[in-house]
Image (spheres, helix red, strand yellow):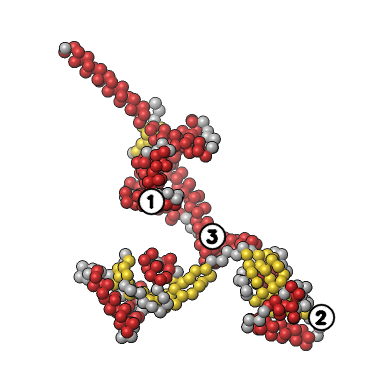
Amino acid sequence: MNKLVKWLGMMLIVLSSSLSQAQEVIDRVAVIVNDGVVLESEIQQMMAQVKRNAEAQKLALPADSVLRVQTIDRLVLRELQMQMARRIGVEVSDAQLQQTLITMARDGGATLDEMREQIEASGISWDAYRETIRNEIITGEVQRGAVQRRVYISPQEVDNLTKLIEQMAEEETEYRLGHILIATPEGSSAEQIQSARNNAEILLQRLRGGADFAEAAITSSSGSAALEGGDLGWMNINAMPTLFAEVVRGKSKNELVGPLRSGIGFHILKITDTRGVEKIEVVEYETRHILIKPSIILSDSRAKDMLAEYRQQVIAGTAEFADLARQHSADPGSAQQGGSLGWSDPEAFTPVFRDMITSTAIGDISEPFKTEFGWHIVQVQDSRTQDTTRVSNQNRAYQLLFSRKFQEELENWQQEIRDQAYIEQVEL
């Protein structure tokens, strides 16, 4: 009996040792990276995922030996960035991760549960996928923090690229022109030329006053398209006469231009329509507000009631909005200006504030409402539509330059942290 017990004990030790060795083969340390490691299992998992993705997209892959080198390089870089994240304290909470996953699912046209089913159906565990996304968020934060300050974009670079964007847009833009020619015969005297100029200016004033352009062309124009109401059809900047192109460039539908002097007389143009124009307009609002912040000594309900009282005083005419803002508003930036926030795009504000601005009629004062900053009342004083195409093109130019330079600097930075790290591959 004792011999049997001893034999079983020896077998358990052998089995335990064998299992331990088998696990080491699966999860052995493959690469030492500073004070961290990359495991063999991580390499195998990433290679398997790359192969699944390539198969789904019907892409050819290199030999496993080449793929392994690329995979190790990716995992080493990730480990270096995660080490940096731990040193500087970058973390992503479960709540932040959950919100990111919900946003990803919504952007993909699915619910979170549906996205989870798709992930698990592809052979990836949901927990592993969550941690992969968490690591991507963390490394993204590390990259932005390290690389962003290395990127410099000069105002001249932005201006040059903005002009190029606008030039490309212009070349794609077509204008439908109406044309009236008040002719001056060859050899006309100074008096005849002045008379033609006067007639053109009088006609232009009539057109600006609402006269029909096509009728005026038929009755007054000496141009070749007079009987067609002056319609020259669709042309881009490069196809129209240089004289016209210089003044039509950037003009909007229904604008009148002229009189323009040429060797044959005076021209009046109307942009009857445009196409291919990328024009961005934003409705801005002139607003002012009063902010009351609840505190230990000022309850939430009392802050709301105070604003309701101020609102009634302004409506009743017993107090001025600006005076109340100067005396009581907790927003130091606007309080000194009588609560004025100036002209602003509502999208610049927090969603609750934005929605209150856009839903409040001009001249009215909103009911008290709460944001993360406290309780507010807001008065919408006026609104206007602004052409922000130029600003939009400048922003686009900046983003294009930043994206290109960021990628260049990111690659430089990643190479630097590789060069400065201790990296050793552990052979079997």
Left or right position of 296 against 41: left
Residue 11 % position (x, y): 25, 17
| Label 2 secondary element | loop
Q: Say whether disc 1 or disc 2 marks the residue closer to the N-terminus.
A: 1
Q: How busy is the neighbourhood of tag 3: few (under 14 within 10 Å), some, or many (20 plus)?
A: many
Numbered disc in front, either 1 or 3: 1
In the rendered structure, the answer to whether residue 203 lies left or right of residue 190 reads left
What is the number of the mark on residue 102?
A: 1
Q: Residue 381 placed where, x, y %?
A: 42, 78
Which label lies toward us, 3 or 2? 2
The crowd level at tag 1 (other Cα within 10 Å; few <14, some 14-19, many 20+) is some
Give 48 or 142, whichever is nearer the viewer. 48
Which of the 4 quarters of the picture holds residue 4? top left
Gap between marks 1 and 3 measured at Cα: 31 Å
The residue carrying mark 3 is 397
Quadrant into which the N terminus falls: top left
**Seen from this angle, which residue lies furthest bottom?**
191
Amino acid type, residue under disc 3 in the picture: Ala
In whole angstroms, how far apart are the C-alphas of marks 3 and 2? 49 Å
Q: Are marks 3 and 2 in contact (CB under 8 Å)?
A: no
The residue type indicated by label 1 comes to Ile
Depth check: 359 or 80 in front? 359
Which residue shows up at 40% across the image and 71% down it? 359
In the rendering, which numbered label is found on residue 185? Answer: 2
Above or below for 395 versus 62: below
Residue drawn at x 46%, y 72% is 284
Q: Is residue 24 above or below residue 259?
A: above
Secondary structure under the numbered disc 3 in the rendered image: helix
Relative height, residue 22 to residue 244 (above, below): above
Lateral position of residue 395 relative to residue 350, left or right: right
